[in-house]
Amino acid sequence: MAEETRKAATMGPKEAGLSELLGKGLSAIPWAVAGLFVLAAVMAPVLAPHDPIDAAGAPMLGLFSERHILGTDGFGRDQLSRLLYGLRPMLFVSLGAVALAMLVGGVYGLVSGVAGGRVDWAMMRLVDILMSFPLILAAILVLAALGASLVNLTLAVAVSQLPIFARLARALASGEAARDYVMAARASGFTQAHIMIREVAPNILRPMLVQATSVVALAALTAAALSYLGLGVRPPSPDLGYMVREGQELIFIAPEHTIMPGLLIAIFALAVSFCGDQLADRDRAAVRP
């Protein structure tokens, strides 16, 4: 740290400006990558050169060509089109599940943290029971009960992420409940509902959103794992997780059919993780005295 400080002090204005510009450029890369994924998923009907389900007489396992830029899969379907459409279930499930988990888990933890006492103890014991199950197992149990579909996959992933937001919201809310402004609101006769909604909730929203950004990566990996197990979108609809499973059977003949969807999943998860880390660093810097 001392060495870095000494180097920064000896930098000229041009060097310091270049270093700052380079740092900002590198920090923008994860956001740009995540944005490209979202844009590609939204614009898939426009960007995809072929129907992702219809083979239309194309050769099976066709090589890269002008008509099929990334070749065709084992059924003769255009691989580029399937990759573009395969982004949509992953993004829908990860973003939808995190939003649902943050809403439900946040409200649950908010009530627990503000109520305190025996109510807090009982509510957190339920969260501990849910956390005793591995995340993927909790999601599988939900899908086993509801059946495999895109909506049920979103619900399953949301259930697996609920304890994360419930515990975070409870910790934040219990800390806020001990502050002077909450004590003053209680002394003024405001109801618990008013204190939770108008006083405490706005002050815990920022760290909850920061946590949500980081959890999106975990939700995307969970959704891909469940789709790999055949518990997600039903084939022949494209899904990156299931495409990895399909390509696994051709790993020694056409390894790109496993590598490409798996690489997209990994890149998206890494990009969103870096975005979450940046938001967390900024949040810590903002609250630092």
Image (spheres, helix red, strand yellow):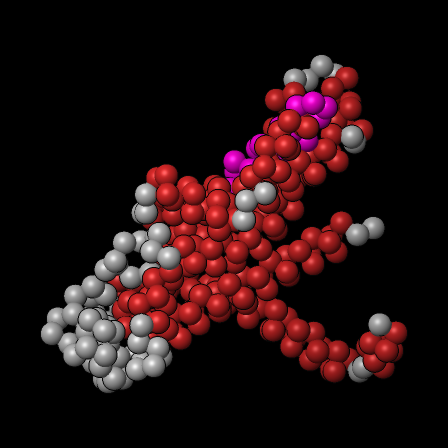
Where does residue 219 sit, x and y in percent of width and height? 49, 53
Toward the top, the furthest residue is 189
The majority secondary structure of the magenta stretch comes to: helix
**The magenta stretch spans residue 74:** no
Which residue lies at the image location 35% right of the left edge and 53% below the top edge? 232
Residue 67 as seen in the image, left or right of residue 19: left
Where does residue 214 sit, x and y in percent of width and height? 58, 55
Residue 261 as seen in the image, left or right of residue 289: left
Relative height, residue 190 to residue 23 (above, below): above
Which residue lies at the image location 80% right of the left edge and 29% below the top edge? 180
**The magenta stretch spans residue 116:** yes
Residue 203 as seen in the image, left or right of residue 148: right
Q: Which residues are magenta?
A: 101-119
Relative height, residue 7 to residue 132 (above, below): below
Q: Which of 259 and 279 lies nearest the eye of the viewer? A: 259
| Location of the N terminus (image quadrant) | bottom right
Q: Quadrant of residue 9?
A: bottom right
Where does residue 204 sit, x and y in percent of width and height? 66, 39
Residue 198 seen:
no
Toward the left, the furthest residue is 57
Q: Quadrant of residue 176?
A: top right
